[in-house]
Amino acid sequence: MALETILIFVANSIAGQIVNDTWKDKVVTFFWPKASYPTRLYQVILKTIQEFEKEQPTQTKTDKFPFYKSQMLFEALSLYILFEEGPKDAIDVAFEENANIIVPTKEDLDKFYKLFLFNANQDQKLKTFFIRENYQGQIFTNTEKLKSLSSLTASVKGDTQKIIGLLDRNSSSQIPKELTTLLPKLEKGKIIGRNSELKNIKKSLFENKQVVLVNGMGGIGKTTLATVYLTEFYNEYTHIAWISATQNGLFNDVVSAPGLLESLRIELGTTPKETYNSVKASLNSLPGKNLLIIDNATEDLATYASHLPSQPNWHLVITSREKIDFFDNMEIGFLSEPEAIKLFKKHYTLEKLKNKYIRELVKNVEYHTLTIEILAKTAQELRTSPTTLNEAILSNMETDIIIRHSNKKVGKILSYLTSIFDMSELTENGITLLKYITLLPSEYLKNEDLEEVLHFLSDTLPRGRAELFKKGWILYNQSEDAYKLHQIIQDVVKSRFTYDTEFLKPIIDSLKSVLTVSLENRDNPVSKFKWIPYGKEFLSQLGDNMIIDISKIQNNLALVLKDLGDYEGAKELLEKVKISAEKNFGEDHPTTAISYSNLALVLKDLGDYEGAKELLEKAKISAEKNFGENHPTTAIRYSNLALVLKALGDYEGAKQLLEKAKISDEKNFGEDHPTTAIRYSNLALVLQALRDYEGAKQLLEKAYQIFFEKHGDHHPTTKIIKNNLISLKKEMG
């Protein structure tokens, strides 16, 4: 008979309940937590079956099932009553008549019956329930019957007075210290660090009389910390209970906590709330200092705050990823680098990985406790190389190690981490914002910068930001007013979603904008440096995505890198932009000409003047062809090529081009415009090289005056022109 069928039968025959299909799943799930003699008898029967099957497993391969899993046996054993001879006659049934049962031998039946009587005799709770439910008078009514029992059951008589004594004592003395059967323990010496956190929890509970909410991101060690606290201060408490929170609410979590109702001797009420009220009343009546731990709580616990046992008799420790109102928050941070390395070496005892590799590894996972344990045990079991281990998360590496977090095999690493961070609890606002933040650097980002680069999420951003912070998905630095998405969560989110063109277009346009240096808007190039990590991170994730146009981001980022002095980085990006432009527009297109010009200026800065000259001559021809000689774009091409010719020593050629650019800019912008001032400055340097000092001085003074009035003396271009003027005057004596 299947276990489910047995449960239903026991419910009907032993517990005296009518079980319909509606209640069927609850019977199977809760194993009849109602504390009573019939349900305890069921547990004894089940224990006997399990022990007998373990000692004498069925060897015959057949569709028949063994006698000890038959309904007939359960019906016989359900008649057993303490202090009587037992169901020996009833158990000796005619199994031969049932074609589906493997017929037992007489020896098997005798062994099974003796094992059952032994278990019943040893089960003090079974005796206690019987006495309580049938009153003490039942004992004396059956006293004479005890004389005729076999020697195996005679010891029941000796236990009778002990049971009566227990019933006469204060009820609290019969309640065990460990109220729940699930009570994990871990010694302080088995973990790395967290000493200060343990002291803070104890101080908050004992001195400040607070409820402690241990808060932190998933996998950081909140449950471990609570477990160690329980173990470390176990003797400080009279009673201890551990509740594992679920999405079903506090009432259901408490009612279904393994062993709690039985320990408190509470009947299952008609509703979870009714049962919970009985539990709460019983808990509040317990003397001494008591500890209740609620693990992995959600923000819904706030609605039950007034229903929880409280100080002074009860100390309450809650662990949660979320910020929960009404509780005192104690946020636990990440391990320090030395602690992270020590944790790795705790699980990895080989010598193959040197310290520098371990240091790099724990840094790459940003000192995330759970991930460090997974990688260390994987390295130990599989003797993984540093390169493979560094790629283990993104490659979703297969491993069969077991970790304390779940006491189960991990399997694929990224898949396991994904199961830890369940996004089903998030709203659409939260998920949308999370997807965009994964495209940004995994570092603390100032709120004002987030609002600027994600300005297109005007409605989603504030709501999503508040949700992600409260639910523990993003970290917050109050002093900097900055938010951060941890690298592990970033990897998890990226593995769950794809990014199409429609989703990416707003952030592409935004990044192009923030990376643009506009002289017309008086942009200081230095102000754009903060956006460099944004552009780099975005391109590192989507740089190989051919369905989106990222060349504008590549171009603008390259120009900012050029201003920063990272010419090699700028060159690498601009070469990609050039190839893309030639492929998509052709060599004579204005867009391609821009890529030539920008790359040429970087080559010039790197000293490759011939390479720069070749590209700028192409850009000049394109501009003259597409815009004419007097167009501002053509003037830029003249100016850029002239600077390269100057560097190559062709001062006359440079002068000729710059004079054409100067005339064009004066015509198009006027003599007081910053663009015109740039032409004055460049032409002045050529005149200086040609020893036309007065002409050069006149132009530099005009250029300096324009920039000083437009941008002030601290603007980089103003400073450059000023320094050039000073050098000229020194040269003039």
Image: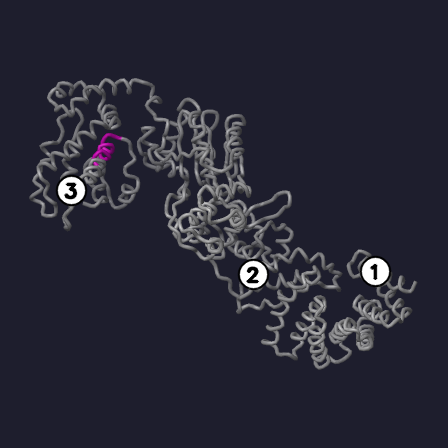
Residue drawn 42% across and 53% down?
415
Residue at mark 2 to residue at mark 3: CA–CA distance: 64 Å
Graded by Cα atoms within 10 Å as few (under 14), some (14 to 19) or many (20 or more), the crowding at tag 3 reads some
Classify 730 as above or below 621: above
Residue 521 at what x, y percent from top left?
74, 62
In the picture of the structure, the residue carrying the numbered disc 1 is: 723
Residue placed most toward the observer, 545 or 215? 545
Depth check, mark 1 against mark 3: the one in front is: 1
Task: Let me know if residue 38 is in the magenta part.
Answer: yes
Classify 21 as above or below 140: below
Observer able to see residue 537:
yes
Classify 135 as above or below 309: above
Residue placed most toward the observer, 218 or 465? 218
In the picture of the structure, the residue carrying the numbered disc 3 is: 70
Q: Is residue 662 left or right of residue 183?
A: right
Q: Amino acid at mark 1?
A: Asn
